[in-house]
Amino acid sequence: MTTIQHLIEKGMITQEQCDMVRQTRSSGQTLLDALIEKRYLDEKDVFRFLMDSLKIMSVDVKSVKINFQAFEILPVAFMRKNTVCPLDFDSEGKLVIAMYDPTELQILEALRSILSQDFSPVLALRSGILNKIDEAMSGESDFDTSLKKVERFSVGKIHLDEKMLHSYSAILNADKSPIVEFVNNIIYEAVQERASDIHVEPLEDYVELRYRLDGRLQVKAKIPKNMHRHLVSRLKIISVLDITETRRPQDGRVQLKIRGKRINLRVSTVLTIFGEKVVLRVLDPEEMNISLDQVGLDSGILKTMELLIRQPQGMILVCGPTGSGKTSTLYGALREMRSPEKNILTIEDPVEYTIDGINQIPVNEKIGFTFAKGLRTILRQDPDCILVGEIRDEETAQISFRSSLTGHLVLSTLHTNGSIAAITRLLDMGIEPFVIASSLLGILSQRLVRVTCDECKQSYVPPSYLLDRYQSFFPTNTRIRFYRGTGCPRCRYTGYKGRTGIFEFLQFSPQLRRMICDSVSENGLRDYAVQHLSFHAMVEDGVRKVIQGQTTLEELDCVIGKQQDYCDETLLPAKGMEDEDKLFIRKQVGEFGELSLDLQKERQALEEQDICRVPDVALDG
């Protein structure tokens, strides 16, 4: 059944309309093209219908960078006539072609005739494909065009005294200025690609522009060095910063709308040996509008957290390094808690996202309004729940714990590598053991890992050293299929799309509180938690998500591999292993974790059978 027949069956168009348009369409024009052109159909409705019915990979061609080696394979006239556009090659060397109607047999046969090889069709909007063809023919995107204009742009060497400041600002504010257009395109493309940060970094011979995508920095462009000053000045102007001040660090904020979508930018400048470096944090309110059950918590931790945030008093800590998703988790908890019956206040540095129904207070150290002073003020505001953005010093810690002992629920963050390490950190900050034991309800520790792209996910066999490192965490006598992304336009050929959290949670019991008061060591607390509190280390949650196909062993190892105690012991016997297994691993694994020749041969033979085995575990790859 053709697409037109499916659309008639769904009631999106009538047979009479099709017959009428078929008689009046242009020569060589497909019926679907003509129906869209005559506005009997909306191309976006057709796109959504095909995406749902065909279950084929779709792509936003606007954000895809064309591989011109692939683009030049098909004649341009053919592409325009049939609304198809080659984008790139996939991991198997097949040509990836954007089409808006992959069911059109005539076009498919023509492609097979021209290419004489298999290809991979992806679904895309008709207008997007045509615009991409025009863009490729011009050889440059809006970003590339504005960059070339910037390269030709020059306002001369300007000394920023007061007499010339006004005229210079006027140049950089002019709507048609190449600098303005280029900065607009930098921000627009960053939002389109869902970048979390934009880095403008001066080097010795050029300026490097980088975007942070899914936690990884990627180079976007190299800008001529003589444009650095003008670019930084424009960014300062839109951030309401002092363009005459270059030696001192400055911080600013920008609020703008991109296609009706509100975006906030947090801007920071600092002087390096080659000039001022500017970093823009892209804050998209829609990205943070998530609930506690969307951050990646497993069902057990989620239920416990939902129970604890309903307690009338006590403290809950979320731990992890900068950029590990602590704010997202706490904001998700606040959304669960907010109610007309509760007065919830936060003290943050800075307030990155606003939440309806929550009173959010920013720290302002310039006027002496610190976390500690803010907390004292909040306590006079009759709060039910308090969120402290970060416990940085002893004073903030003392006030936070006292608040949790006087009838308030306190949520906060701490920079430690693990849940149990947070207890040691608090003791180092001067908090008495009995205060920690009586206040804390639970400690959540987390990291963010990239999620395997669903569109290009395929099974594979992970490297030997990773299987050996994590084999003690795999379920025994179980076949596991590992997955990774091979790369596609949707994930920009990285194999990953989006991020999720991996967690460990320590819930406090009466015995654990007594052990803290008795100053039991960190190892002693960990052993008790594992044996009696069902405590699972973060690596276990990570391996669980690997087994579920959400991420890869390579990504897990990159994020937490070198930060956890077990990593220094990956080549040592695992818990619960028999003596023969311990001896087997020691014999087979060399000093640097390489498999012995015998085990490599065994592994190779098993891979040929599509099975990968490590000691005690059968893995179906």
Image: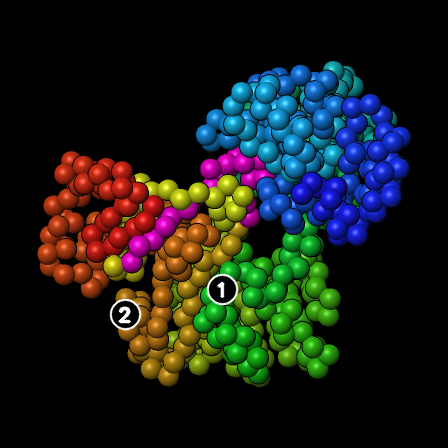
Q: Does the rendering let one see residue 542?
A: no
Tell me what residue is drawn at x 48 percent, y 46 percent.
452
Find residue 251 and report its horizontal and vertical position in percent.
67, 45
Tell me what residue is drawn at x 36 percent, y 66 percent.
536
Q: Nearer the viewer, residue 611 or 175?
A: 611
Decide if residue 488 is on the left or right side of residue 510: right
Mark 1 = which residue?
297
What's the residue type where badge 1 is placed? Leu
Q: Secondary structure at mark 1?
A: loop
Tell me what residue is drawn at x 34 percent, y 53 percent.
480
Tell me what residue is drawn at x 28 percent, y 73 percent.
531
Q: Quadrant of residue 39?
A: top right
Dot 2: within a 10 Å radius of its alpha carbon, few (fewer than 14), some, or many (20 or more) residues?
few
Find residue 229 and report its horizontal and vertical position in percent.
69, 26
- Figure quadrant of the N terminus: top right
What's the magenta bit mostly, secondary-structure-wise?
loop
